[in-house]
Every structure is written in C-alpha cells, then in structure tokens.
Amino acid sequence: METVIAGNIQGFKQQDAVLIISTAEAQARIYVYSPSIIRVTISKKQEDEDPSYAVIREPLADFDIDESAEFIKVNTSALKLVINKSPLRFNFFTADDKPLSQDDNRFGTNWQGDRVITYRKLYPDEKFIGLGEKTGDLNRRGTSYTNWNTDAVDYGLKSDPLYKTFPFFVGLHSGLTYGLFLDNIHKSYFDFGATTDDEMSWFGADGGDMNYYFFGAQGVAKIIEDYTWLTGRMEMPPLWSLGYQQCRWSYMSAKEVLKIAKTFRKKKIPADVVYCDIDYMEGFKIFTWNKKTFADPKGMMDELKAMNFHLVTIVDPGIKIEEGYRQYDEGIANDYFAKYPDGENYTGYVWPGRCHFPDFFRDDVREWWGAAFTALTDVGVDGFWNDMNEPAAWGQNMPWLVKFGDKYMPEVRNAYGMQMARATYNGTRTILNNKRPFVLTRAAYAGTQRYSAVWTGDNTGTDEHMLLGQRLVNSLGITGISFTGVDIGGFSGNPTPGLMVRWNSLGVYTPMFRNHAIKGSKMREPWEWGKANERIIKKDIEQRYRLLPYIYSGFYQSALTGLPISRTLAIEFPFDEKVYYERFQNQFMFGDALLVAPVESDKLTTDVYLHKGDWYRLSTDEKLKGGKIVNAPSPLTDLPVFVKAGAIIPMQSVLQNTTEKGDGILQLHVWNGKAANEFVYYEDDGNSYDYENGFYYRRTIRFDPKAKKVTLSAVVGNFASRFSKLKMVWHGFEEMKITKKLIELENEQLEIFYNL
Ligand code: GLC
C-alpha cells in the first residue's frame, strides 16, 4: 500500500465562507465557525463533504487571511492558524503567538489507502483529557484508543472500544488549552504519544476525510462551551428522571412491577421511576406487550401513576422476522431495513431470534419508528430506553457488506445508535405533545446530548468498576454528555452489601441515579441488603431528593452552557498536577459547589485532595484548608463530600417523589467564605416545554461577605415557584446558624443580612 502525503500547496482561493487549498494530492478546506473555532478538512477526493451528524452550526460568511511566500495565515481575534505552504502543514497559535498545536513537521496528514491520519507534535508537558466513554486514566497521555461502537459485554477496566464514539479531546500544555473534534464516523483512532517515543500524537480514521474542528479558547470550561455550541446541548430533562430510578433485567410481570413500586411507597424510600426490561414484550417484539404477564398495561400504568411512578420501557433496534408482526410487515412492505448489496435484507440474531435492522439513517424510517411509540405512550409510558444499538448482533461482527442507504456498515456504524435515539426522541416528543420524553441510549456519537441521556452499559459489581464508572461519567461530561449514569451496584456479578451501600451513596451525586442488574443476579432493591443497610440507602436517596433544587439548576446551567453536572477537577483546575494523580483522579465537582471523593467500600478513611481555598465537610460542617491532601473519614454512612467556601445550595425537604407538592419551603444553604459568590437558581414545571415560552422562574442568588448579606435578585420569567417561603441555613457563620423565621418568597429582590 502506498502512503500518500498531502504535499506542497499549488494554489488557493477564498470563496466566501471557505478557503480552498490545493496540492497535487489533496484539497484542504478551511472554515471559521467563530473566533475560537476553526475547521480544517483535508480530502483526496474533490467531491462533496459527508454530512455531519454532530454539527448544528454554519461557518461564518467571511474571514481574514494573509499570505506570504511561506505561509497562508488565518487570523481571528482569538486564534491564528498558520498554514505552511511547502509542505502543507497546519499550526495553531493563540492570538499572541503562543503555539497551541502543530502538525508533526515530518508527516502532517497522509493516507494509506482510504485510511487518513494526522500526526501532531507532542509537547513535553502535554496532557490530554476527553474522548467520552473510555477506560483508563483521566490523563490519556501515553495511551491509544479506537472508536468503534461495540456491545462490550463484561468490559474490563482497560477494555476498548466500548459503546460510544466521542472523537473530541482537550489538550493542555504550557499553561494553555485547546480542543480538537474529529468529525468522522468511520472507525477512528487516537494515539496520545503511546507509540512514538513521546515525539508525536496522532489521530485519524479508516475512511472519510480528515475533518477536524480546532478550539482555541483558553480554559477547559470555555472549550466545552464552544464544543457544545457546535454540537448542541441537552434540553431540560423531565424532573422525574432526576429522581431515583429502579431497574432490573427484568421485573417479569405487571404484578412484580407494581409490587416494587408499592414497596418503595410503603417503606417511604423516595423513588420516581421503575423500568421494564425486555421481558415485558411478547417474544421480545418491539412495541408489543406480553399478553400473559402484562395483560393490562394501561391498568398497570394507571396504578403506577396513582403512586406517582413513571415507567421506562426498553426498545432494541432488532425487529423480529415474523409475518403478522406489525413492525416486521411494515418494514418489509416499505423496505425499511438494512440490506446486502443485492437487496436482500440483512438478518442477525438478537433477543427475539432472527431480526432485521431499521435503517435509521433514512428520514422516512426514523419517522416510522418514532410514530410507532404510540404502542407505549397510549398507555402512559414516557421514558424510552434504547439498547443494543451499536448495533449489536450475537457474534458482534455485522458483515461489512451490510448497507444503510448507499453506505456500508463500516462507514456509518458509529452513528447508528445516535440515529436511533434521534428517531426515538423526535417521535416521542411529537406524540407526547408538550410533555418532555426521557430517552436513554447505550450507543452514541458526538451530539447525542441533543436527543438522549446515556448510560455506560454492562459494568460489573466491583469497587474498581465503581471508580472506573465515575471516570467514564466525568469524561462523558467533557464531551457534552451531561445526563449520564452507570448501573449502580454493577450490572454483572453481585456486589457485597457494603459496595451496594457505597455505590448508592455515590449515585446521589450522579446525574442519572439508576440501580440496574443482570438477570439471575441477587435482587438489588434498597431493602435487599439488611435493615441497617436499608436505612443508610434510604437516607442517601433522601439526600438526593433534598438536593433536587440544586441539581435541577445544575441541569439548567448545562442546558445553557454545556458545562456538565459531574465535572472532573481538570475542568476547574486544569494545571493543578495533583488532580491527575491516580489516587485523586476520580474526584469530581458535582455542580458548582460540591466536591465528591469516590472511595472503595472497604476503606474507612481516604485521602482527598482539596484544591486551595477553604472547604467544609458537607455532613459535619468541619472547615478544612485546601491546597493539600486531607485524610477524611469515609464510613459507609458518610461518603466524603465537601462544599466550597462561599457556596450557595438550594435544597428542599425530603419528598417521596418529584410530583409530590412538598412543604413549599425553599431551604437556602450558604457556607461562609471570604470571596463573593453567586448561583443561578432555576425552576420550571419540570414536565413541559412551556419554559421555552418564558414559563420559568429564575433568580440570581448572591453571597456578599463584605456587606454580610445574601441577595436574591428579582424573579425573571413567568412561572410561579412551588416554594412560597424561604428558610436560610447558615454554615460556618459565627453570627447565626439558622434563621428560625421563614421569609416570604416574594418575586421582588430580597436582601437578607446575617449580622443582625
Ligand atoms: C443489555 C443491556 C442491559 C439489559 C440487557 C437486557 O445487556 O446493556 O442493560 O438489561 O441487555 O435487555
């Protein structure tokens, strides 16, 4: 196989939004999307570009370039791209000429057959974070990864690839940050200096164009903001989906589902969601109900609703081959399935047996799929769990001959799951009218946050998996996926009671809080672990419900800026070396205020690294000096969680579910600190899209230690808060602990002085 190197520039022209550069071997195109986002494509072919499933923005209409004998320069207010003419190389600098990221001068971009790779210079202190759902360490330097969406059954601590593809990373060196998104859905590769004697990093794909977006903003949060501006952000989730979710493969009958729900209510353990895994269906046929075990789905749903429970049902892409089954007949009649080149429908085995697979890349197929959800929504289901959409078929290796439209499987595989989630989201959003659907998907590609939450697939019930799961969640957050969770307790195997308790306490601080387990495993519900453990689990779930006003506001922040809820410390403290140490790398911020230190279930104390500044232990209000390592008690009753000095956390009294009205009192917790701080409080009906038309309630809460006061700005928006009274709870203040008197929560600006 010949290696083709993009050689010297022979000519270039700027046509409005695009700068087109030609060499004998290739054509490069440069677009500017914003002052801090420049796109580079390099292609051997001169045809139209592949469509992007990720990007939702258009480039700017025009931008400035300079030319000299050696270079063409693209200048924006934030970024400089210096394009070397002979040979063609792309080097990025800050506006004040500091090198951010450069091609490896020897190799640049080249091809072997259709495989295209870009080689980059590696800086001595360079670190890399990102790529979403990838095992390994927070700092990915010295490792390499492949993107190829896989049904990663029983994945291990170092397995790669897993279920999802997020070809986006952030590089950090010399006190500078940059981001790079390779928008290519072919099988792709990232090597962060693993194999090159620390000389270079490289990335590329088995086919398609070299097509990357370079982000030059300074600060990891800013880069995430730009990346999610480009690929979209999640919308406000239904509030109920932030409550506790109880799942299992499977609750086998309507009777069992109802028994689970009733037990939560009887034991007064808060919960909002129960799931039906594959066994609710007739022969695993999607959009059917088992006539024996789920004979009256509407009756079951009515009972669940009366208890304020929501039901999420699983849907897999495989359509059982069976004449008389509606989805099969319609799929055949309209030719909706993936095919071999000769037109024969591809057949693979999944749960139902022999199946065909919808071609979700087609608009008409997505519409057909989306409309079929009435089979579930008609009885009252409003959560839809998309599984097996890598796509999975037993044996894993779907033949490379299988075609989706005019593309072969390897050309589109990594976006299949995303297109299924898109079809599910669009369909159910339409059917549910103004109500928010909850969609959960296992396979995903960059941009999936616009349609769905994700979970990290079939993990295992061990301490190591709990910690790995946290890194996966934190890393997914870097790539725009805020709404994410793991199977708490571990899907496979049986956790020890101690691990179950610990993992549940970590679940409180996970964007999606879902307990799930494999068929045949020990039952996992909170009451299955002995009385003493049940009490701890209950207390932790109650803590989740207390924190919901804070968590919901965190989701609002995420919908607005793309900043995740669970944030690796590398987002806020990117140049603090300790953040990357193996023993601290699982720590994360949960929202703006809380630092959580995940710890194995058998450790009674653990070392925690607190960045400089003052911190408080959440459970005791003990004040701790940051900038050092502290040894924190970590009994199973008390996961180490710390609050940043100056933090503002809105809470509420414990509810049994998010539909419950509650006592109408918003508890505003403030922790004393030297610096002023603010928090944006957000509320809406938690259920509809009315917030898009101004029906929300937002106020900025300010803590001002100099003036000794907390101010709530006047309310913005037309929604009436469910809270009518305010209770101030002061932490670390000498003056007062708690203001006994409740304050009327009027809509005007409110000032509360704490030295009176
Ligand atoms: C897959 C899913 C798992 C589900 C099971 C049965 O393994 O990852 O969550 O329970 O299929 O549907």
Image (tube, grey):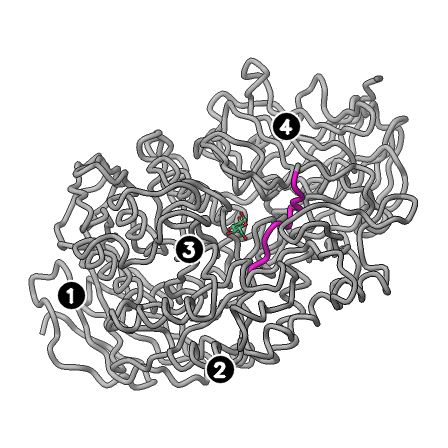
Task: Give the image location of residue 26, x and y in percent.
Answer: 86, 31
Task: Give the image location of residue 434, x and y in percent.
Answer: 58, 80
Marking on residue 102: 4
Q: Determine whether 38 is above or below 436 in the image.
A: above
In the displayed structure, does residue 432 sit left or right of residue 669?
Answer: right
Residue that badge 3 annotates: 565
Is residue 192 something one can see in this rendering?
Answer: yes
Q: CA distance from mark 3 to mark 2?
A: 23 Å
Is residue 563 something one can see in this rendering?
Answer: no
Range of residues picked out in magenta: 385-394
In the displayed structure, does residue 442 sit left or right of residue 531?
Answer: right
Task: Decide which of 158, 251 is in the foreground and name it.
Answer: 251
Pointer 1 or 2: first along the chain? 2
Task: Give the image location of residue 667, x and y in percent.
Answer: 23, 72
Marking on residue 730: 1
The residue at the point 61 percent across, 49 percent down is 388
Which kind of residue does numbered mark 1 sit on?
A: Trp
The residue at the point 70 percent across, 28 percent down is 118
Which kind of residue does numbered mark 2 sit on?
A: Phe
Q: CA distance from mark 4 to mark 3?
A: 32 Å
Marking on residue 695: 2
Task: Determine the secondary structure under disc 2.
Answer: loop
